[in-house]
Amino acid sequence: MSDSGSDAESRTDPELSDDAMGRFPVPAFEDLPDDLQDRIEEETERSGFTPNVFAAFAYKPSHFRAFFQYHDALVEDTALEREEIEMIVVAVSGVNHCYYCNVAHGALVRIYAEDPTLADQLVANYRTADISEAHRTMLDVAVTLTERPTELEPADLEALREAGFSEEAIWDIAAVTAFYNLSNRMAMFADMRPNEEFHTLGRE
């Protein structure tokens, strides 16, 4: 990170909001291990603010590292498009009623899909959203895995193949779904609160 005056003036320094979660204390940024500080600084510079999920998971550094390492693998080593990943997250978070993920990933759906209304449709009822049949099949499987995992059948995987998804993409659909079920439950348990910035991102 440059030390030039112009860069210093434009940079947004990390700020871990005390309101990031309601049921556990949020640590002070300066008390965090160096690797967590580095990751949070990178995300703050990229986003223009510090997403509260980083502040919340910093409560337990070993879990922070594992959580974001898996997150990064899911979005960087994937056969899915980024907008498909975010669609899964929002559909799953919608049926789980996860406030943080609905708002934060709703913003990401709007940005990656370049659609200001899609996230609201997915949260309300993904089956009536303006999406392709392939994406509706993808979300059907993700929601079944979320709500009724014992009901998944080989036919569900076959439906994904017929919809055009590769074997790797089918794995990735399940992995994203499973990870965000974990994320939803931790966000709800800790009472994580979405940053105000997320509410308006990608709406215009």
Image (spheres, rainbow, N blue to C red):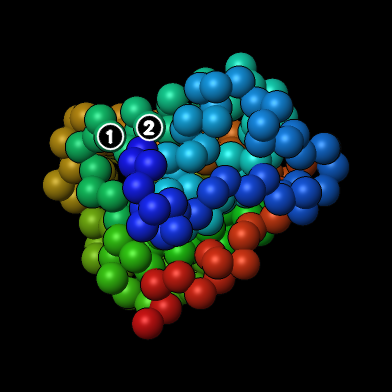
Helix, strand or loop status at disc 1? helix
Task: Tell me, yes or no, whether the two marked residues, 2 and 1, touch with CB atoms within 8 Å.
Answer: yes
Front residue (pair 63, 83): 63
Say what amino acid the circle numbered 2 marks: Asp
Q: Position of residue 159 (x, y in %)?
A: 26, 45
Q: Position of residue 201 (x, y in %)?
A: 45, 70
What residue is rendered at 43% in x and 26% in y?
A: 70
Question: Is any part of residue 154 visible from this angle?
Answer: no
Quarter of the image with the C terminus in it: bottom left
- What residue occupies the far top of the structure in this picture? 62
Front residue (pair 47, 161): 47
Q: In the picture provided, is 156 more to the left or to the right than 61?
A: left
Helix, strand or loop status at disc 2? helix
Real-space Cα separation, disc 2 to disc 1, in angstroms: 6 Å
Say what amino acid the circle numbered 1 marks: Glu
Q: Is residue 33 above or below residue 173?
A: above
Front residue (pair 170, 54): 54
Mark 2 Cα shell of 10 Å, populated few (<14), some (14-19), many (≥20)? few
Q: In the picture provided, is 121 more to the left or to the right than 2?
A: right
Q: Provide the residue designation for mark 2.
A: 72
Circle on res. 76: 1
Q: Position of residue 189 (x, y in %)?
A: 77, 41
Q: Is residue 99 above or below residue 61?
A: below
What residue is rendered at 55% in x and 67% in y?
A: 197
Circle on res. 157: none
Q: Is residue 75 above or below residue 48?
A: above
What residue is rendered at 85% in x and 42% in y?
A: 23
